[in-house]
Image (cartoon, grey):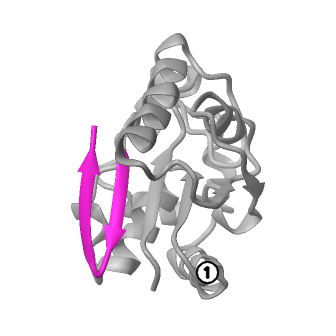
């Protein structure tokens, strides 16, 4: 598997409010815009900004890629998981446990198996290093798959950093 550089979109209004987005969108906050620009600076400092870029179709991911200075090809298989009836609801309403496993039981939402299948199909198309601009759960899923981690709840999904995954190991640049 080729090395991946994985970026989560910058903070959105709904992230700040603790509201679930899934397939819905909200605008980047001022902090989110700074985070996205910082990710581009990290890539340029590492000399890695010239790799091909795949971006989720969500506006928050496409805007983040643009703020990072990255031209990108839209890739639907790296869209955030669908959260069904929970999209738009607040975390306070749902009161979930830590981690991401609970997101896979959202009424009408996407299962972990479905997400894993779509991410595996995406990974199978890659023939060289690529930058991926995506979302929290998708970032965790990609990184877990590439590192052989079965408990996805062990991985965090911070914004404003660059995850470099190569040869089954991850380096996080902040």
Q: Which residue is mark 1?
A: 126
Res 87 quadrant in image: top right
- Left or right of 116? Residue 46 is left
Which residue is depicted at the point 55% across and 20% down? 33
Q: Is residue 118 magenta?
A: no
Magenta highlight range: 162-174
Which residue is depicted at the point 49% across and 36% down? 40
Describe the element under mark 1 as helix, strand or loop: loop
Where residue 64 sits in the image (x, y, percent)? 61, 34
Where residue 3 sits in the image (x, y, percent)? 42, 73
Where residue 49 sits in the image (x, y, percent)? 52, 48
Res 142 quadrant in image: bottom left
Q: Residue furthest top?
A: 30
Give the number of marks.
1
Where residue 123 sits in the image (x, y, percent)? 57, 81
Q: Observer-nearest residue: 48 or 151?
A: 48
Q: Observer-nearest residue: 21 or 45?
A: 45
Q: Observer-nearest residue: 46 or 173?
A: 46
């Amino acid at each position: 598997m080729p090395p991946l550089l994985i970026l989560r979109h910058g903070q959105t209004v709904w992230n700040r409010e603790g509201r679930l987005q899934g397939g819905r969108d909200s605008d980047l906050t001022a902090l989110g815009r700074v985070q996205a620009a910082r990710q581009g600076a990290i890539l340029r400092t590492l000399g890695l900004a010239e790799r091909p870029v795949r971006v989720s179709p969500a506006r928050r991911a496409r805007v983040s890629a643009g703020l990072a200075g990255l031209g990108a090809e839209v890739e639907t298989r790296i869209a955030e998981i669908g959260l069904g009836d929970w999209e738009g609801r607040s975390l306070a309403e749902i009161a979930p446990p830590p981690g991401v496993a609970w997101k896979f039981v959202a009424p009408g939402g996407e299962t972990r198996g479905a997400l894993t299948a779509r991410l595996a199909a995406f990974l199978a198309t890659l023939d060289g290093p690529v930058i991926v601009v995506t979302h929290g759960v998708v970032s965790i899923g990609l990184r877990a798959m590439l590192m052989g981690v079965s408990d996805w709840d062990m991985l965090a999904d911070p914004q404003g950093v660059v995850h470099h995954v190569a040869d089954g190991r991850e380096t996080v640049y902040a």
